[in-house]
Structure formats: structure tokens, C-alpha cells
Amino acid sequence: MSRHTECLIHLDHVSKAFSRRAVIDDLSFEVWAGEAFCILGRSGTGKSVTLKLMIGLLEPDGGSIVIAGEEVPTLRRNDLLEVRKKIGFMFQDGALFDSIPLSENLAFPLRRHTSKPEKEIREIVREKLSEVGLEKELNKMPSELSGGMRKRAGLARALVLDPPILLVDEPGSGLDPVTASEIHGLLRELKERQGTTLVVVTHDAARVRGFADRLGVLDHGRMIACGTPVELADSRDELVRVLASGEEANDVVSKS
Amino acid sequence: MARLLKTLGRRFVTFLEAAGEFSLFGGRAIRDAFRRPFEIQEIGHQIVEIGSRSVPLIIPCGMALGIVMSLHTRASLARFGASSMIPAALTIATFRELGPMVTGLLVAGRVGAGIGSELAGMRVTEQIDALESLAIDSFKYLVITRVTACVLALPILTILMDFSGLTGGLFSEATVSHISARLYVHRGFAAMRWSDYIPTTLKTAVFGFIIGAVSSFLGYTAKRGATGVGHAATQSVVLSSLLLILVNIILVKLTFFWFS
């Protein structure tokens, strides 16, 4: 596994509080190039905040966040924007720009960051949309798309610049099982075919087990367990075991 | 009593915090406006949105204002046998104060609410975060472009308002006293100096900055979902109108000081 030799993401003792309430508390983990790392946890445990800290949308109160060799919180604005070009971010609800059609949502970053001719941009947009099964929805406005379509479109937009790192926020939440499986299938393909480094935040371990190399379990902003899906499924901690295996919870009480 | 003082104190601190945040926001808007990239295309798009789409509001309002002003001025000046001064009085009043102020307030209502709700909507639906994640400086792309467009559009809209007001006044005067357009314009501009016109039109660029910066600030920093969007839209109109009226006092004083 030669591609798992370079550390692309390194969080070291990161903390973040909102209105004096600690959301992330002394969080540390590493993600290697080409690896799929899935962060599991119950709602409100700081999973999405972790992703936003990684891409510099939020500033940590303490600790260090290194992405592709750059210390994100200390970067100047322009340098931060350069680092972000290496990272795709799929938002929980797609976060499509609602005033422009789907095709423009994808063309926009290409026009901003590349000097590709318009014809090539249109081809890339078509190709990316067909990868997520939305080539027929090209000219639709985001408001005309279903929740699942918006998520897939969000994924296509996150991938339009072919970033080596992809951060994914709750890929299956609020979707029917078929659509959720489709999106997880797309993520698996992405990892296997292009070797994209994935950090996926979810509470649905059953679906990510198919492609996750390692799982991390967050509880009250702390990483309480980290390991392969098999290791965590055998954990003595019931919360870890329930989250990692996706089995029914039975009086699970989280550590506080 | 203690509770009342505590509440007032807390509100005062909140006000100071908001004023401080807005000052930093406005300062950043001025600084970043002169830094690359200049987002010319988006500024052009915003000028169309803010400027061109305000024209259907500005022209009829200007004409109505001119007619009403003419009726009031006639009622007052006719008593003193000074009807011939009506065009001059109308022109000076419109160009010096009414045109700029009414344009500012109309744009604050139309554009302020629009910018506030649009940016707040983008904030609560994570579209601003999405822009940032795509390595696009959302502040430059969303805020600077809107503030710049407001600064550029306001003086142009004010000129339009001024001339619409004059046209309304002419229409009214021509109906009542059968004055010719040529004589009306001659009498109107005979008493006018450049200092009655240029500084008062240019001061609307400051109004544009206030409207753009206040509404962008409230939209860009919005929180609390749909409630936050509504709050940003309402507060954008209220605060930018209020600030505009207050800042106008200073600008009028400065105009008299420099162009006395």
C-alpha cells in the first residue's frame, strides 16, 4: 500500500468552543494519502465542526491543523485559498448556489481557477454530472432538484477541480436507502479509481464500512476510539461498538 | 432598578460590540476594494441589479416629488408675488438636498433589503461556506462587489432623480402657469452653481457605501436560520436609512464648510 505513506491531514490537540461551550476538545488524528477515514459520532458531537476546521472555515482555539504540509490556521488569506484548491468539500445539503443553474454551479470554479476554454469547461461539467447520474439535469435550477440530487450535485461540484482530498459531510443523511447507497458507492469508486483521500463524517457506519480504511469515533468533541472497522466493531465500549457496527443501540450512555 | 441597569448595560455592550464589528467590516471593505482581484464582471452584474433595476422606482418617484414640490412652492411663493422664482427654488431644493436624500432612502429600501436577505440566505444555507471551500474569497466576491456597485450606482441614480424631479416640476408649472420648457430650465439653472450640484451628487457615493456596507454586514454575518434572514432584511433597511440621515447632517455641514 505505497499510497498510504504520506500524511496529508494531521490534527494535533485541536480545540474549539462556541460561547464558552467546548465543541472540539483536544482532538488529534492523522489521515494518510489515498486513505478513507470516517468520523462517526452522534449528532452534535462536533463532526461537521471538525471538517470546517480542516478547511479553515472555522479557526481553532488551540492546537495545530496541517493539510498537505500547510498549517491551515496560520496561513494568510491567499495561501489558505491555494490550499483549498486541493480540497473538495461536499456539504450536508449540497449548498448549491441557488441563483444559477446546475451546470453553472460546476462551471463556476473551473472558470475561476483554470484557463480552460469554454468548450472544455462544458465537457468537464457534463462528464462530472454524468458521473453522479445528473447529466439530464444540466440546466435545472437547484430548487428544481430533489434532496438526493442536490447531494449528488454537491459531490460533482466538490470534485470538479479534481482535488486530491475530499471532505464529505453526512453523505447519506435524510436520504432514502437506495440514494444513500448510490452516494456511498460513488465515494467508494472515487477512492478506488482515483485514489482520492476521503474524510467522511457520518453516523451511518454500516454504509461507510465498504470503503473506510479507518474509523474514528467522536464523542463530546473528543476522539474516543480510532481503528479499522473490524477493530472498532469488537470494542468493549458500547458506544464505539454501536456506532462502528451500526447495530441497534441498547441503553448506550456516552462518556461525558 | 438594578435589573433595569443590568439590562441597559448589557444592551449597551452589545451595541458597542456590533458597532466595533461593523467598523472592522467597513474598514476591510475599503481596504479590500483596492486589492486584486477586482471582480469587474461581478461588479458590472451588481450595478445592473442595484442600479438599472432601481430606475423604474427612481423616475416616477422623482417626477411625483417634482410635482408635489412645485405645488407647495407655488402656494408659498405666489403669496409674495415671487412666482417667477419657483423654477430656481425647485431646482436648488432638488439638486442640493431632496434628490440625493430621497434617492438614498429609496435605494436603502429596495437594495438594502435585497442585499441583506440575499447574503443572509446564502449564509444560512452554507452557500458562503461553499464559495470559500471552492477557494473563492467570499468577502471580495459578495461584499466588495455589492458595496462598490452601490457606491457607483447612487450618484448616477441621484442624477436621474434630480432630472426626473425637474421634469415633474416643469410638468406641474407648465400646466398651471403655461411656462415654456426653455424658460423654466433657464430660470431653474440661472441661480445654480457647480457647488450646488457636484458635491451634493458626489456625497451620495457615501450613501451608497453606507447602504452597501450595512446591508452586506447584516447579511454576511447573519445567524439563526430563516429568522436571521428576515432580521437581516429588516435591519438593513432600518439601519442604513437611519445612518444615511445622520451622516447626511455631517456631509451637509462639510459641504457648506468646503464650498461656502
Image: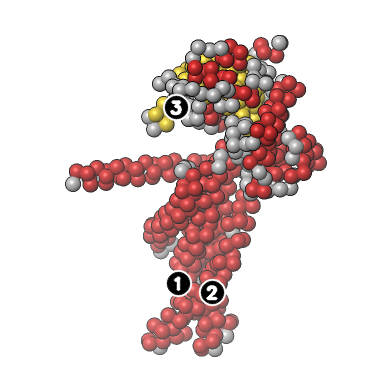
Near mark 1 (Cα within 10 A), the count class, few <14, some 14-19 or many ≥20, is some
Near mark 2 (Cα within 10 A), the count class, few <14, some 14-19 or many ≥20, is many
Q: Is residue A179 left or right of residue B141?
A: right
Mark 1 highlights which residue? Answer: B93
Q: Amino acid at mark 3?
A: Val
Mark 3 highlights which residue? Answer: A23
- Do the CB atoms of the residues marked 1 and 2 lie less than 8 Å apart? no
Which mark's residue is nearer the viewer, 1 or 3?
3
In this view, which residue lies farthest toward the left?
B1
Q: Earlier in the sequence, mark 1 or mark 2?
A: 2
Q: Relative to B27, say whether B84 is above or below.
A: below
Mark 2 highlights which residue? Answer: B63
Q: Position of residue A156 (x, y in %)?
A: 70, 35
In which chain is the residue bearing label 2?
B
Q: Position of residue B111 (x, y in %)?
A: 53, 57
Helix, strand or loop status at disc 2? helix
Q: Amino acid at mark 2?
A: Met
Helix, strand or loop status at disc 3? strand
